[in-house]
Image (cartoon, rainbow, N blue to C red):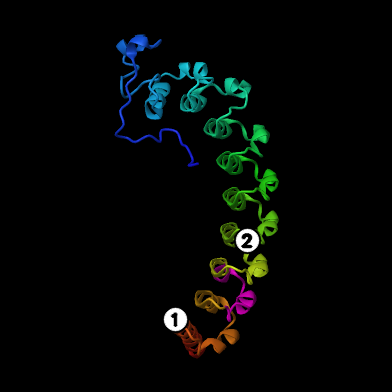
Amino acid sequence: MPERHIGASPLSEVVLADCTACPHRALLAAGKCVPGDVCLMANSGRQIDRFLRRNPQFAEENLADVFWERRAIAARYAPLEVLRQQPRDADEVVRRVVASRLPVDELDDYLQDSDREVRMTVANRIAPERLGELINDADYLVRTQVARRLPHGQLPRMAQDEDREVRKEVARRLPPFALGRMVRDEDADVRRIVAERVLPDDAAKMLHDEDWLVRLEAAQHAPMEAIAELVDDAEPDVRAAVRQRLNDFLNEEHE
């Protein structure tokens, strides 16, 4: 099932509601609603949002509407104290909105939500010291979001994550001195990131990597005495980079 988002209907779609049956038709004369553009009763996310943006006082009465998108948009504009008292909505899009608005210390009920985007919203907002509760989330996108914000001291716990996208994020954030644990990662993209940032002695361990781009990055950071063995590397770009670095070093020595 594809993810649903507020206002996702085509821009070319114009939805008209019946103004004669609208309980808010008095607003029409005051210019606070516009048929086909700013309307609470049309089943159009864009029109509903424009209406409640102008008239937020009507948000609370729509928090229990039968149309999921009207409830979700109402949750954007309803007073926070009212939103807190609402029962947990059955629709994941509504819950995402609620999770984006509640104070960060009131998100406990959404940590294990069945919808991954709700959990991603929580992972993006919750206090960093609470992120450990989501390290083992079933969805890699949630874990990737966790890896982006997790305190450095806890990041090594994710260095062996089963998903390479998570490990790539860990490799981007771990301090260079802690990257040695990832020099043998099974994924070449992860190792390339490691090779870009790792300390010289650990870069030396990557000079014979099977991926030439990893060797190329490692050759930029490994100690000079270690890279000489790559002057005859099978990959021309690696040979060129090594020889250039050796030449630069010799020129500096003679200056």
Query: Which picture quadrant has residue 237?
Result: bottom left
| Three-letter code for the amino acid on which mark 1 is drawn | Asp
What residue is rendered at 60% in x and 40% in y? Answer: 122
Three-letter amino acid code at the position of disc 2: Leu
Q: Is residue 248 above or below residue 151?
A: below
Depth order, front residue of 178/138: 138
Q: Position of residue 78 (x, y in %)?
A: 52, 22
Q: Nearer the viewer, residue 197 or 47?
A: 47
- Residue 22's place in the image compared with 251, above or below, is above
Q: What's the mark number on residue 5?
A: none
Which of the two discs, 1 and 2, labels the residue nearer the N terminus?
2
Q: Residue at x 48, y 19 (%)?
A: 59
Which residue position holds label 2? 174
| Tag 1 residue | 237
The stretch in magenta equals 194-209
Mark 1 and mark 2: span between their CA atoms? 28 Å
| Label 1: element kind | helix
Q: Residues within 10 Å of mark 2 (few under 14, many from 20)?
A: many
Question: Where is residue 214 shown, x and y percent of the image?
Answer: 53, 74
Let me know if residue 196 is in the magenta part. yes
| Residue 18 vertical placement versus 137 (above, below) | above
Residue at position x 41%, y 26% in the image? 49
Q: Residues within 10 Å of mark 1 (few under 14, many from 20)?
A: some
Q: Is residue 155 left or right of residue 254?
A: right
